[in-house]
Amino acid sequence: MTQQAISAELAFSQPFGDQERQVLTPHAVEFLSELVTRFTPQRNKLLAARIGQQNAIDGGALPDFIMETASIREKEWKIRGIPQDLQDRRVEITGPVERKMVINALNANVKVFMADFEDSLAPSWEKVIDGQINLRDAVNGTIAWTNEAGKIYQLKPNPAVLVCRVRGLHLPEKHVTWRDEAIPGSLFDFALYFFHNYQALLAKGSGPYFYLPKTQSWQEAAWWSEVFSFAEDRFSLPRGTIKATLLIETLPAVFQMDEILHAMRDHIVGLNCGRWDYIFSYIKTLKNHPDRVLPDRQVVTMNQPFLSAYSRLLIKTCHRRGAFAMGGMAAFIPSKDEALNRQVLDKVRADKELEASNGHDGTWIAHPGLADTVMEVFNAALGSRQNQLDVSRADDAPVTAQQLLEPCPGERSEQGMRANIRVAVQYIEAWISGNGCVPIYGLMEDAATAEISRTSIWQWIHHQKTLSDGRPVTKALFREMLGQEMQVIRQELGEERFTQGRFDDAACLMEQITTSDDLIDFLTLPGYRLLA
């Protein structure tokens, strides 16, 4: 079957093998084609609006609550409702849509698995197609995987509830074009997961559930609501069948949470504190403001005033509207060293106790080995309740724009800068080699943490900041450290792994995006050009 024979509107650059034929069936492609032609022009306008908003902030304006939508914030209203199998989300695990990962995550001691086509997946064509097959098999209960030693992995009874995270609005799917333009990756991921799975999900008492990343405005949320409503109408499903949780992981979005919930009230079930991307967005959005430069990444914890305000406002806003307020990611990985592992679990426990006592309904982990510890924390906080929708925080003093933008104290150290370089280079190398989820120095790194690492240094260079030892951070200093840290990475990983990897490409890209005069929006955009 030729590409053109399958769709008059869409062109596919990859040959259709067995995997493609399972996923890109004529009816699935027809649905994708309808979504692309109907919703791409508006998506392009939304991306252009982001640029306009950023230009205003670069010119000196600061993000703020919107005057025109004050009535939405002031009136009493609720979202449409939350399905039964999403009522209890106390622990959610996240990870890419690779077959073994999907099985292990669904079997973990958690309530929800967020299967990720976004920040923890490097979206090569093969991985994106495989991911759709893996999720289809998971929904049907037929997924299994055998490792080289012959060990078989398969689903246990009562697996976690599956939620699919699609790519952000800015990411293209370059292997499919419409009118000579790469189609939105978000529509590709949504269309195929929804089309192949909605019937089986509904038949077993679940539904097509999504996580939406990187939203920057209520208008973007309204666009998603239209996409969902179109899909429901197209397949004669009741309004509100499709449900989504939206990540508040950009600085502009934190000022529009009521509006986002309102725009998506038929389809939304909650918001999530996507803390790592939020820190990245704080740097990126306020990049021209010298008084908002962040210190070492390690210092920027949820105890910092601007992040604490964000968490509390999210909980208060969501619970007032009957929506869940999900906590952020514990990126730690359990250690085989017993003493070290105790330290890791103590840090995770303290972080999750803070979220639970603040009133979050649940939280994220990146590794099954943290599930029992985190489950214990939320079990203790929730008691017999399924969630914490009853925690209103109504007596809190109003959270102000000033608090959400509060500069963050802390030092800029040589050690912090070098660590940023090593983490970002190793992550970029893994990503362009096809792996979007990488353990580095005891943390599960995804695109967000690499973004913080490289934008932080860009910001220090841009504003001619000094390190704590008095040295100015310049492009020359960065290049010198990059060269030195490449040798450290070579020693740490060993000659064979280093020479067989794509470290030269990664260092090149790191150098390009850290020293460019204009801040590159997302490292995954130039990175995607280096990915098969």
Image: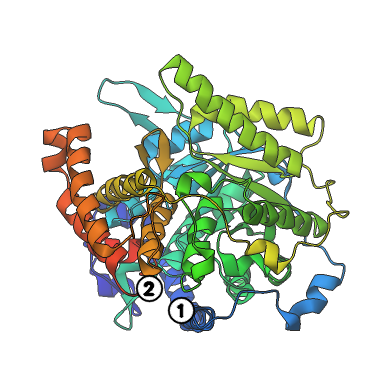
Q: Secondary structure at mark 2?
A: strand
Tell me if mark 1 has few (under 14), some (14-19) or many (20+) residues whose alpha carbon lies within 10 angstroms of its own.
some
Question: Residue 177 in the image: x percent, y percent?
Answer: 31, 75
Looking at the image, which is closer to me, 355 or 400? 400
Looking at the image, which is closer to me, 445 or 420? 420
Residue drawn at x 21%, y 62% as measured from the top left: 15
**Snapshot colouring:** rainbow
Q: Secondary structure at mark 1?
A: helix
Q: Which residue is mark 1?
A: 40
Q: Which residue is mark 2?
A: 183
Proximity of marks 1 and 2: CB atoms separated by less than 8 Å? yes
Question: Residue 150 in the image: x percent, y percent?
Answer: 29, 21
Tell me if mark 2 has few (under 14), some (14-19) or many (20+) residues whose alpha carbon lies within 10 angstroms of its own.
many
Looking at the image, which is closer to me, 11 or 489? 489
**CA distance separating discs 1 and 2:** 7 Å
Quadrant holding the N terminus: bottom left
Q: Which mark is residue 293?
A: none
Question: Residue 237 in the image: x percent, y percent?
Answer: 66, 63
Residue drawn at x 16%, y 44% as measured from the top left: 501
Quadrant holding the C terminus: bottom left
Vertical order, 29 against 386 (above or below): below
Question: Residue 165 in the image: x percent, y percent?
Answer: 50, 54
